Image: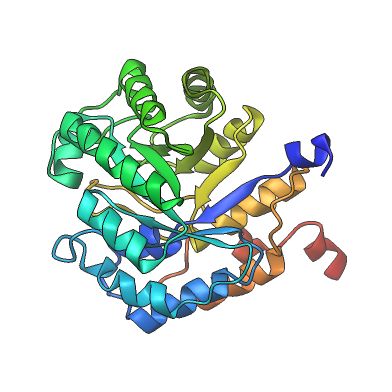
Amino acid sequence: MTASSSANKVSICDVGPRDGLQSEDRIWSVDERVEFINRLSKTGLDRIEAVSFVNPKRVPQMADAESVMAKIDRPEGVRFAGLALNLKGVERALDAGVDEVRYVVVASETFNQKNQGASTEQSMSAFDGIADTVLASGKRLSGTIGVTFGCPFEGEVPLDRVLQIAQRYVDAGVHEIGLADTIGCAVPNQITERVGAVKDVIGDVDLTCHFHNTRNTGIANAAAAVMAGVRLFDASLGGIGGCPFAPRATGNIASEDLAYMLRNMGYDTGIDLNALLDVANWLEGYFPAPLPGQVMKAGLFPEVAQAS
Ligand code: ZN
């Protein structure tokens, strides 16, 4: 691979089976979740956040993660991530055969308390033991910073707070750090600024951006992030999702909209866009209303122009 082609490579992790389904009123069956994941894994996506190993009493939509992991296809070149918020969840994730464990610390005290029932410091301190366990297993370890750009309860989140968590993650040995705009409040210049500041702290640790589109700034934020050098993104097919612990939060940016924008900007995601759109249309059949994704309605350009 030449330097220029690797500089153009961008990877999208579809988080729809986790972030997307976890706030749905209708609880998807294991077989439905498996079919969703299997369809995604045939589109050229190289990473899928398939499950979370959290308490099923708190998030019943994510129950039976072990069954989902046991039943999905595992095509070569596709990595399957699982979210865990404590050591028990991490051990379940490793036993279930995930390729990657994702952990979350929320940058605001109130939200961390609501999301994981612990103070930010408690979540951060617990991470050291978790990191050792995951690293000893040889699996990839990712630490997400929730509400990096704003909190629904506390408002503005100080940059120092974000940088401190990033530093703790780096010290613990993570492979990757995720910056999450959990409630979709960020705007592009804020992305440029925070991505730059975080990169200065984390050095060559990988950086992912996770944007929700609650205020319709998500795709603009993704554009700012890719131009700031970010090469890893989370997104959810069709833009499904929300957050059970964040008032008024809506879905992630749509994977197919992001993949379309990146392709037409000259980046290589490895995704077969037509195949991804087919899965988005299949997915829509499970929802009572049209999904938020835009490209699934408008079609690809220039392909639609050539076809008509
Ligand atoms: Zn999210």
Q: Nearer the viewer, residue 110 or 134?
A: 134
Asked whether residue 307 appears in the rendered view, the answer is: yes
- In this rendering, the answer to whether 112 lies above or below 36 is above
Residue at 74%, 49% in the rendered image: 268
Question: Would residue 118 be found to the left or right of residue 8 on screen?
Answer: left
> Dividing the picture into quarters, in which one does residue 26 lie?
bottom left
Percent of width and height locating residue 60: 21, 68
- In this rendering, the answer to whether 193 lies above or below 113 is above
Question: Would residue 226 be found to the left or right of residue 52 on screen?
Answer: right
Quadrant position of the N terminus in the picture: top right
Q: Nearer the viewer, residue 214 or 12?
A: 12
Residue ranking furthest to the right: 306
Percent of width and height locating residue 9: 71, 44
- In this rendering, the answer to whether 90 lies above or below 197 is below
Q: Nearer the viewer, residue 92 or 217?
A: 92
Residue at 25%, 70% in the rendered image: 63
Question: Would residue 78 be found to the left or right of residue 108 on screen?
Answer: right
Residue ranking furthest to the front: 136
Percent of width and height locating residue 298: 66, 62
Quadrant position of the C terminus in the picture: bottom right
Question: Would residue 99 be found to the left or right of residue 260 on screen?
Answer: left
> Dividing the picture into quarters, in which one does residue 183 lie?
top left
Asked whether residue 217 appears in the rendered view, the answer is: no
